[in-house]
Image (cartoon, rainbow, N blue to C red):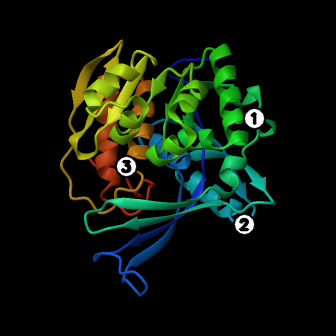
């Protein structure tokens, strides 16, 4: 099933984002002026959209959404070139995130996981791997029992089918709540781990990203740690093997930058790029992502 011609299947979260950009600090107990937009988002869905934008011809996403917004999300995914495999949930609303974005483009999330973490083993089948060359699991799935069981099932069946699996740890805050040991046990068997620097520190207790990346690469065959504007580093076999810089841009909103990196990285790997070249593609997408509002690609062709 593996090979450059195969599809990318993402299993993860599909979210309604409310992005509030405020130029002045938040003022408690009164009003703070902001520019507010409601947009489609979610780490898994964003990564899928960026993979499609980066040239992957067959991208699919499995996720659970509330019936309140299922049609809207399906249309948005199809417009982005992604094949939606959405499970409607009549009992829970679609996951939603309030992204508070300050004048430096840094974002803080308020998250209501809603239907996303209700993805259950019954929503999965081995047939979803037909034609799939890579499986990507959004780390958010591992932070609730039903979706964690589903992610573990997908990981196990992908490995049995010879399909490599990547995982984005998703949230340093949620990692701390779940526990590092529980997370690492749950993602055991993954080929690629894609943490940001904070997540890598949380997973290893190492302050230096280089040391954290090297340590994680003793557990996973390939580790790529994203460093924001500083780029990314690749680690394999217990040592850092490549460092990649990111294009200099003027940031507007950092929401989804890591998802953009993930999507472009995986698209490049599917196209045959080595890890360093794939990380370069990821950095270019991440740089583009911070120049637009929200976590999805802009319309129109990719920037040069």
Q: Residue at x 52, y 36 (%)?
A: 57
Element assignment for label 1 = loop
Of 101 and 164, nearer the camera is 101
Q: Is residue 108 left or right of residue 166?
A: left
User: What percent of the width, then of the height, locates residue 105?
Assistant: 30, 62
Alpha-carbon distance for marks 2 and 3?
Answer: 27 Å
Of 17 and 75, nearer the camera is 17
In the rendering, which numbered label is found on residue 70? none
Q: Which residue is mark 2?
A: 68
Relative to residue 27, is residue 181 depicted above or below? above
Q: Which residue is mark 1?
A: 124
Q: Quadrant of residue 82?
A: top right
Q: Are marks 2 and 3 in contact (CB under 8 Å)?
A: no
Q: Earlier in the sequence, mark 3 or mark 1?
A: 1
User: What percent of the width, then of the height, locates residue 114?
Assistant: 67, 58
Q: Which residue is mark 3?
A: 257
Q: Residue at x 28, y 32 (%)?
A: 209
Q: Earlier in the sequence, mark 2 or mark 3?
A: 2
User: What percent of the width, then of the height, locates residue 260?
Assistant: 40, 45
Q: Residue at x 50, y 20 (%)?
A: 191
Relative to residue 179, is residue 218 depicted above or below? above
Farthest residue in the left direction?
A: 248
Alpha-carbon distance for marks 2 and 1?
Answer: 22 Å
Element assignment for label 2 = loop
Q: Is residue 57 left or right of residue 162?
A: left
Taking the image as drawn, is residue 102 in sight?
yes
Alpha-carbon distance for marks 3 and 1?
Answer: 28 Å
């Amino acid at each position: 099933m593996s090979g450059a011609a195969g599809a990318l299947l993402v299993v993860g979260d599909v979210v309604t984002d409310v992005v509030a950009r405020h130029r002045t600090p938040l003022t408690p107990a009164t009003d703070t002026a902001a520019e507010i937009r409601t947009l489609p988002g979610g780490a898994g869905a964003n990564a899928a959209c960026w993979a499609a934008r980066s040239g992957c011809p067959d991208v699919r996403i499995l996720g659970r959404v509330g019936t309140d917004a299922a049609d809207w999300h399906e249309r948005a995914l199809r417009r982005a070139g992604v094949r939606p495999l959405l499970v409607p949930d009549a009992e829970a609303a679609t996951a939603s995130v309030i992204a508070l974005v300050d004048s430096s483009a840094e974002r803080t999330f308020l998250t209501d996981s809603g239907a996303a973490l209700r993805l259950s083993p019954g929503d999965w089948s081995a047939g979803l791997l037909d034609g799939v060359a890579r499986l990507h699991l959004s780390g958010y799935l591992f932070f609730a029992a039903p979706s964690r069981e589903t992610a573990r099932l997908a990981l196990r069946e992908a490995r049995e089918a010879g399909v490599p699996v990547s995982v984005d740890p998703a949230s340093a805050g949620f990692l701390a709540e779940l526990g590092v040991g529980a997370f690492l046990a749950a993602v055991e068997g993954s080929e690629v781990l894609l943490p940001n620097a904070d997540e890598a520190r949380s997973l290893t207790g190492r302050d230096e990203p280089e040391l954290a990346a090297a340590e994680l690469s003793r557990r996973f065959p390939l580790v790529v740690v994203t460093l924001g504007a500083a780029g990314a580093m690749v680690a394999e076999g217990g040592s850092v093997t490549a460092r990649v810089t990111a294009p200099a841009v003027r940031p507007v909103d950092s929401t989804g930058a890591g998802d953009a990196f993930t999507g472009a990285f995986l698209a490049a790997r599917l196209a045959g790029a080595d890890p360093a070249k794939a990380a370069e593609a990821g950095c270019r997408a991440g740089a583009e992502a911070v120049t637009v509002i929200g976590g999805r690609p802009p319309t129109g062709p990719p920037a040069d």
